Every structure is written in C-alpha cells, then in structure tokens.
C-alpha cells in the first residue's frame, strides 16, 4: 500500500513539475511548485525522514509559495498600474 | 494548467490530486505502524542508536559489530542497549537522533545556518525597506468569516509551532520548522485583516535577543566545558521533556529567531506591496 502511494506521489511530483515548467500562467506554475513540495514532503515521510518532511511542508509548500505569490502580485502591480 | 488546455484534462488532473490525498489519509491512518512498535534498529545505523561516541569509536577500532538481534559478536566490549524511558545519564539524551547531531554534535554548523537565514532576511529587508511606490489600493475587504477564522487558526498554529520547537529533542521537528509554522500563522493574520501589521521594532528586538541567546549559550559551554556549544546541563532519562540538556534551550532560541525573522520578511513584502 505504501509502495503504491509512493508511486502515485512520484507521478504527482513529475506532473506538477511539468505544469510548473510549461504552464502559460505564472500563478499555475507557483501553485504547482507548492504541490511538488507537498509531494516531496510526503515522500520524505515515507522514507523515514520526518524531520525533513516537516521542514519541507512548512517552508516549501507553505511559506515560499505564499512569498512567490506576494512577489508576483508586487511585480504585476508595478508593471501594469496604468490599466486601473 | 495551460490556458489552452481542454477542460477534461484539468478535471482529470484535479481528480487525480484529490484521489492522492484520499489515499494518503487512508495509508497514514491504517498502514503506518504505531510509534511504540517501530524497531529503530532496523532502519537506522546501529551506531547512531548508541548515544555514545566513545563507545562507538571503541567498537569501530576493535572491529566489533552486531548481528541482527543486537547481540554483540564479541563479548569483551561493554555494551548496554538504550531503552526508551529507562536509560539515563547518556552522553546525549535526545530521543531524536537527528536533533542530537544537528544541535549537539554539529552545533557550530547550525549557528552558521542561522547566520545564513539572518543574512537572507537582512537582504530582503534592505531591498524592500523604504520602497514606497504609488500603487492603487485594493478595494476587496476580507469577510467576517475570514477575519474570525484566521484568528482562531492563528492560536492553534502558534501553539503547534511552539510545541514543535520545544519538543525538538523528542519528536521530529525543531527550531527551523517551528519558526516557519509560526510565520505561516502570522501570514494567515495578514490575509484575514486588511491593515494588519505586527510590531516591527518588537520583531527586531525579539530576533536579536534570541540570536544573542544562542551565542551566549555557546559561550557558557565554552566556559563550563572548555568547548564552544558544549552541553553543560545534565541529561536525564531518555524520552523525558528535560532530558537532553541544552538542546531544548537552543531550539527555543532558534525557533523564536526564525519565527520573528520570517514574519518580518513577510511583513516587509506584504506591507510594502499594499502601501499607497
């Protein structure tokens, strides 16, 4: 069961990576990067590394995704402030 | 997904992700072994579980190894197995092996890691501070549910972060994840209220004091044990809260430092973005 779940997680990570690279929208890319981090964190947990899993989930999937989105909003506001 | 992707592909992808989460919950609650049934000796190197560098070196020197049932192959080397909740006064009393390496044996390395994070946060704040660009103010206000919900969630998240870094020597986790969890809670507060801003000076003072506390603990070790960042407190029974000497103190300092640092970074990014 755990092997099956790990396989699914790896597929999720690879799919998320593809979306992150090839997506046209920046927001989709950032969110799929968070998804990849979540999958990697689950994989770490099953590979007996709970310390790394907790750090990856808190920083990779939580904070860095949020900071990317904030930075993206900041860039868009600075660039296209004329439309409003 | 891509903007020109057909709708069906998006739906299949979404169903796949949701299915993985459902299977994950199922696996975690049914298939994982209980904590007290795991035999650590099967998954970790046997020398790590020994909690004593001197003994391990002695065994390596004499070429002594164990067979599968933790029975020593040679009898002339003294060896006592470490039992959770019974063994006491070990060289390093942390039940979490990773923590004993990260904070105790490699404490100086962790000090450098904290410095790296401090420099990164300083760089972010140096770049973003004082930049006041004219941006149109957003008109959407967070709803009442968001406002109340984030506040309740913040209390729980904050408590969990504190738990993670205080119990760093007993359970997985430690100062860095604990601080990141606390900063995530503060990020939730930003989302819940429009004009929220934490006390900037308070965050700075807090961060500096906890960073200084780390170095001061190291210097106390230098004075008491003739080595920088040496464990100067007694180690109790393995598995207790007060069992690992100074590891809990250092992790409290690191957790407060990382939490206030990442909160200050988030604050700098969000507040400067919404300045008008």
Image (cartoon, helix red, strand yellow):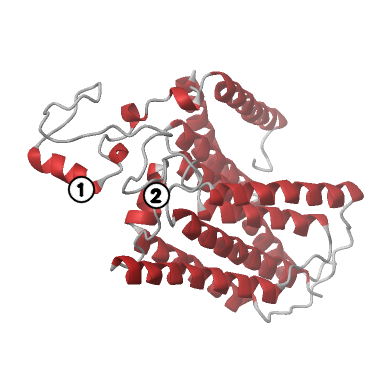
Disc 1 and disc 2: Cα gap in Å?
A: 17 Å
Where A22 sits versus B276, above or below?
above
B224 left or right of B120 in image: left
Question: Furthest residue to the bottom?
Answer: B130
Residue tagged 2: B235
* Front-most of residues B32 and B228: B228
Instruction: Decide if residue A60 is in sight here.
Output: no
Residue tagged 1: B54
Q: Quadrant of residue B182?
A: bottom right
Image mark for residue B234 = none
x 36%, y 59%: residue: B231
Residue B108's spot in the image, x, y percent? 35, 64
Asked if badges 1 and 2 are on one and the same chain, I answer yes
x 17%, y 45%: residue: B57
Instruction: Decide if residue A69 is in sight here.
Output: yes
Crowd rating for badge 1 (residues with CA inside 10 Å; few <14, some 14–19, many 20+): few
């Amino acid at each position: 069961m755990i092997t099956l779940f790990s396989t699914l997680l790896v597929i999720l990570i690879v799919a998320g990576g593809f979306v992150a690279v090839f997506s046209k929208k920046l927001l989709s890319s950032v969110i799929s990067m968070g998804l990849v981090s979540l999958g990697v964190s689950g994989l770490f947990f099953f590979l007996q590394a709970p310390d790394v899993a907790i750090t990856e989930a808190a920083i990779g999937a939580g904070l860095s995704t949020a900071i990317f989105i904030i930075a993206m909003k900041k860039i868009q506001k600075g660039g296209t402030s004329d439309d409003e | 997904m891509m903007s020109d992707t057909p709708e069906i592909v998006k739906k299949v992808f979404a169903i796949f992700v949701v299915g993985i989460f459902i299977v994950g919950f199922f696996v975690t609650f049914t298939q994982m072994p209980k904590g007290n049934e795991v035999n650590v000796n099967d998954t970790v190197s046997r020398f790590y579980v020994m909690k004593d560098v001197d003994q391990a070196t002695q065994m390596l020197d004499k070429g002594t190894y164990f067979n599968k049932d933790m029975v020593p192959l040679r009898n002339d080397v003294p060896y006592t197995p470490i039992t959770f909740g019974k063994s006491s006064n070990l060289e390093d009393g942390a039940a979490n092996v990773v923590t004993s390496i990260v904070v105790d044996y490699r404490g100086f390395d962790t000090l450098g890691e904290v410095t790296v994070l401090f420099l990164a946060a300083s760089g972010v704040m140096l770049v973003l501070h004082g930049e006041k660009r004219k941006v149109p103010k957003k008109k959407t206000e967070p709803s009442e549910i968001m406002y109340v919900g984030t506040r309740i969630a913040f209390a729980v998240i904050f408590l969990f972060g504190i738990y993670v870094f205080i119990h760093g020597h007993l359970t997985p986790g430690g100062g860095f994840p604990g601080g990141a969890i606390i900063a995530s809670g503060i990020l939730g507060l930003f989302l819940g209220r429009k004009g929220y801003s934490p006390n900037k000076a308070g965050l700075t003072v807090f961060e500096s004091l906890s960073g200084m506390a780390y170095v001061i603990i190291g210097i106390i070790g230098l004075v008491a044990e003739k080595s920088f960042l040496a464990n100067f407190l007694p180690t109790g029974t393995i598995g207790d809260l007060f069992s690992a000497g100074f590891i809990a103190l250092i992790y409290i300092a690191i957790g407060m430092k990382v939490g206030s640092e990442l909160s200050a970074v988030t604050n700098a990014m969000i507040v400067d973005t919404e300045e008008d």
